[in-house]
Amino acid sequence: MSGYSRGGLMSAFADEAAAQSRRPPHAQRQSRAGYGAFFLSWCWVTLDVCGPVAPMPPPPVLFYGWWGCAALGAYWLLVGLFGRARGPLTGGPGLLAEAGGASCLLWNRMYPAGMPQAGFLLHGVYLSVLCSVLAQLVAAWFAEPRGDALALVDENIAENEFDWE
């Protein structure tokens, strides 16, 4: 047993979800783009295992889970790329280091010898990390500058204006 309890893992996911909701909107947007690209790249890696082009029909749980992950990934990617929140790139040097490491590992085929299943999983991890980072960089690239702060405040007030009648 690894020492992790089921409650400990669930609390870690709950803590991450709570931290995500406290981040600024532009950071949430970039994270969603990264999560969506991660899900979609895993769907690409497992397309011939449990997706619609599998040689043998997979169990229904895997088949519907694959489609659910693909739909969730597409939704998060679209929301992350075309959301309204604008702001600077969060974690720029770290993202570039992560992309560089994943692309080097993927290019040099750093997989354990004689273990095709582990190689398959590591290939998926490298590809997913690279796609996730690229989606976050594209999401930040699409975040065009919005002008000065006073214009942004005026726009926010106009959007949230309450009609007292």
Image (cartoon, helix red, strand yellow):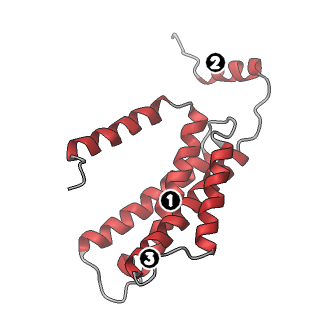
Q: Nearer the viewer, mark 3 or mark 2?
A: 3
Image coordinates for residue 148, horizontal then vertical, percent = 79, 23
Mark 3 vs mark 2, CA separation in Å: 51 Å
* Residue ranking furthest to the top: 164
Q: Which residue is mark 1?
A: 38
The first of marks 2 and 1 along the sequence is: 1
Displayed quadrant of residue 146: top right
Relative placement, left or right, of 72 versus 88 is left
Residue 46 visible at all: no
* Residue ranking furthest to the bottom: 55
Mark 2 vs mark 1, CA separation in Å: 36 Å
Secondary structure beneath dot 1 equals helix
48 to 80, vertically: above or below: below
Q: Amino acid at mark 1?
A: Phe
Q: Which residue is mark 3?
A: 120
- For image coordinates 57% across by 47% down, the residue present is 80
Q: Which residue is mark 2?
A: 157
- For image coordinates 64% across by 18% down, the residue present is 157
* Residue ranking furthest to the front: 113
Q: Amino acid at mark 3?
A: Phe
Confirm or deny contact between disc 3 and disc 2 (CB under 8 A).
Answer: no
- For image coordinates 54% across by 54% down, the residue present is 77
* Along the line of sight, the residue nearer the viewer: 74 or 103: 103
Image coordinates for residue 7, horizontal then vertical, percent = 21, 42
116 to 153, vertically: above or below: below
Residue 65 visible at all: yes
118 to 98, vertically: above or below: below
Image coordinates for residue 115, horizontal then vertical, percent = 39, 81
Within-10-Å neighbours for mark 1: few <14, some 14–19, many 20+: many
Secondary structure beneath dot 3 equals helix
Image coordinates for residue 26, horizontal then vertical, percent = 61, 36
Within-10-Å neighbours for mark 2: few <14, some 14–19, many 20+: few
